[in-house]
Amino acid sequence: MSKVFICAAIPDEQAIKEDSAVAVATAIEAGDERRARAKFHWQFLEQFPAAQDCAYKFIVCEDKPG
């Protein structure tokens, strides 16, 4: 059964200053947190290939209805 996970990629301060990196957040449907994290990493790098040169912290948490 799919669950909804909130995923965020937050750049470090050096990446913000030097590369104008921005924070990104989205909701991902997946069976568990591990799959949501993998799916988010993949989608993030597809959309922002230049982000491979920056340091990002990835945060994933399950969304609970209500």
Image: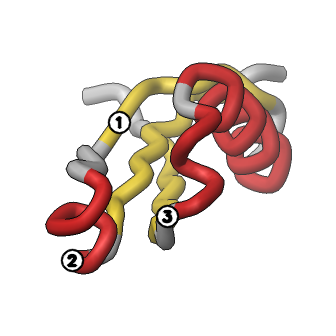
Residue type, label 1: Ala
Residue 55, percent across and down?
A: 49, 71
Residue 65, percent across and down?
A: 36, 27
Of 54 and 58, which appears nearest the observer? 54
Of 60 and 47, which appears nearest the observer? 47
Q: Residue at x 34, y 60 (%)?
A: 10
Cα distance between the residues tagged 3 and 1 = 16 Å
Of 31 and 45, which appears nearest the observer? 45
Q: Residue furthest front?
A: 18
**SS under mark 1:** strand
Residue type, label 2: Glu
Q: Quadrant of residue 1?
A: top right
Residue 31, percent across and down?
A: 82, 33
Q: On screen, 13 above or below 26?
A: below
Q: Residue at x 53, y 48 (%)?
A: 51
Q: On screen, 51 above or below 58?
A: above
Of 22 and 3, which appears nearest the observer? 22
User: Mark 1 or 2, which is nearer the eye?
Assistant: 2
Residue 3, percent across and down?
A: 65, 28
Crowding at dot 3, Cα within 10 Å, few <14 / some 14-19 / many 20+, comes out as some
Identify the residue under disc 3.
54
Q: Tell me which numbered mark, 3 or 1, is placed earlier along the sequence.
A: 1
Cα distance between the residues tagged 3 and 2 = 10 Å
Q: Is residue 66 shown left or right of residue 27? A: left
Identify the residue under disc 2.
13
Q: How is the image coloured?
A: secondary structure
Q: Quadrant of residue 4?
A: top right
Q: Residue at x 69, y 44 (%)?
A: 41
Cα distance between the residues tagged 1 and 2 = 17 Å
Q: Which mark is residue 25?
A: 1
Q: Tell me which numbered mark, 3 or 2, is placed earlier along the sequence.
A: 2
